[in-house]
Amino acid sequence: MGRRGRNNLTEESIFFITTTVVNFTPIFENTAFCDILINNIKYYKTRYKFEILGYVIMLSHFHWIVRTEQKRGTVSDIMRDIKKFTAWKIFGLIEKENLKELENHFIKAAEGIKDQSRKLWMSRFDDEVIRNEKMFWVKSKYIHDNPVKAGIVVKPEEYKY
């Protein structure tokens, strides 16, 4: 992901990140898929020693604010591993549950991509460095208001994820 200038970020440690499922597929309507994502985040939180300052899992994407320790792993390392292993586990559950239509959707999304038979996530993720307290609170409010704006809940605290 260095093509986006992330390799130049050496002192920054707090990021607002968004990553999205291909074609905005609403897979996180399925709580089992949410659980897979959460469990992978917990695993990599231990490995990379990052701190989660806020998050929301929406139907087709998730946002979070994380504080990283560059010497333990960059934001690119963290996102690469979370996305890769979450995809593997979700694909495993899709196969186990025989969700053929969903499986075919992700197979089609990988067409034309070398060495890839299925594709869950969009190739890139978006990130912004949190530069000050005001920006942190703006992004935190955005994260927590997202399910309200989407019409999923009336109040942010009603949303499970």
Image (spheres, grey):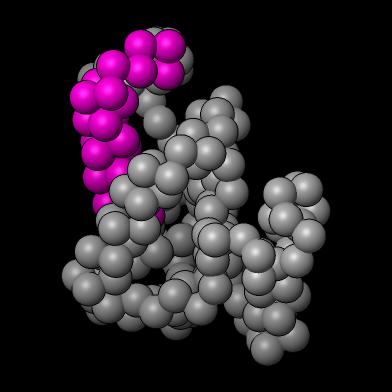
> Residue at left 28%, top 56%?
40
* Residue 41 seen in render: yes
Query: Relative to residue 97, is residue 34 drawn left or right?
Result: right
> In the image, residue 117 lies at what x, y percent?
28, 17
Work out whether residue 38 or residue 77 is closer to the camera in this orientation and state it. 38
Residue 119: in magenta span: no
In the rendered view, would you say 96 is above or below 8? Answer: above
Residue 146, picture quadrant = bottom right
Disc tally is: 0
Q: Main secondary structure of the magenta part?
A: helix
Q: Quadrant of residue 72?
A: bottom left
Please say if 137 is above or below 115. Answer: below
Please provide percent x and percent y for residue 106: 40, 19
Question: Which residue corresponds to the image point at 42% horizontal and 18% vertical from the top-left?
Answer: 102
Q: For residue 43, which quarter of the picture?
A: bottom left
Which residue corresponds to the image point at 29% horizontal and 70% vertical from the top-left?
A: 45
Q: Is residue 101 magenta?
A: yes
Q: Nearer the viewer, residue 104 or 154?
A: 154
Q: Residue furthest bottom?
A: 133
Q: Position of residue 125 (x, y in %)?
A: 51, 48
Residue 80 placement (x, y as % from top left) = 32, 50
Q: Foreground residue, 140 or 30? A: 30
Residue 122 appears in view: no
Residue at image coords 53%, 54%: 57
Q: Which residues are magenta?
A: 77-102
